[in-house]
Image (cartoon, coloured by chain):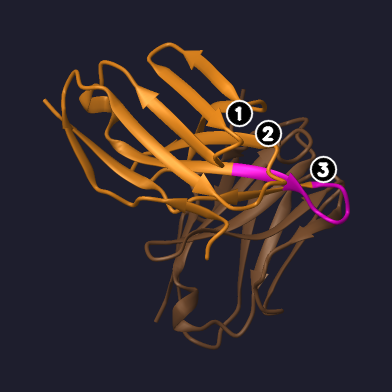
Chain colours: A orange, B brown
Amino acid sequence: QKEVEQDPGPLSVPEGAIVSLNCTYSNSAFQYFMWYRQYSRKGPELLMYTYSSGNKEDGRFTAQVDKSSKYISLFIRDSQPSDSATYLCAMSARNSGGYQKVTFGTGTKLQVIP
Amino acid sequence: KAGVTQTPRYLIKTRGQQVTLSCSPISGHRSVSWYQQTPGQGLQFLFEYFSETQRNKGNFPGRFSGRQFSNSRSEMNVSTLELGDSALYLCASSLRGGDGYTFGSGTRLTVV
């Protein structure tokens, strides 16, 4: 079983819809939770970075962390065609040397149809 | 401010050859991490360097190696290339490591 599970999609939604992207994880040592967006032929870019359980909002994006259920979500409100990309969840935990090690989900491909 | 620069952008190599990829992190970032990205496996962690020391390592064979210089620039080397090494290799820099990466655009390696 992978430490981080993410539905690969693809997920296709009409413009203006609310999008929900999710990841589950098995390692209770994960401390930091991130969402990255990756456009075709580009490297991932950091969208959201959270530490604690609860919600964090940034414009149209809301990241939600539920540590008790080992479940994180990214919500995109009023989705736009420019949101069409692959979304990767990531989370980090300290390794035996005390340094953060980041593990990525495989990514969910999102297409927003005009 | 300048982003993370990876060179070259594209590379075609023959099985058995070796290859060296380069990454220049954002100025002031001391942590450089390398990832391999393939359609089937997603982003797989190779290693992380911080102030010229490797402090994290993924589960890749010894053919994959890296180093970091005093100016934080990093190189990764793959020896005895195999067809399965064909992938997008991404470099990510951060201030401390694990605190949110800035990725480069990657080097697309094709092994034939």
**Segment colored magenta:** A91-99
Can you identify the residue that label 3 sits on? B71
Inspect the image, locate mark 2, and give the three-letter code of the amino acid beneath it: Ile
Neighbour class for label 3 at 10 Å: few (<14), some, many (≥20)? some
Q: Is residue A94 magenta?
A: yes
Could you tell whether A83 is left or right of B107 in the image? left
The chain letter under disc 2 is: B
- CB within 8 Å, label 1 to label 2: yes
Q: Residue at x 38, y 25 (%)?
A: A75
The chain letter under disc 1 is: B
Can you identify the residue that label 2 sits on? B26
Of circles 2 and 3, which is in front? 2
**Which percent across, then down, holds residue A19?**
29, 28
Q: Is residue B78 magenta?
A: no
Inspect the image, locate mark 1, and give the three-letter code of the amino acid beneath it: Ala
Asked whether the residues under marks 1 and 2 belong to the same chain, the reply is: yes
B20, A108: nearer the viewer: A108
Along the polypeptide, which appears first: circle 2 or circle 3?
2
A25, A90: nearer the viewer: A25
Along the polypeptide, which appears first: circle 3 or circle 1?
1
**Which percent across, then down, holds residue A95?**
80, 53
Determine the residue located farthest toward the top in the rendered image.
A59
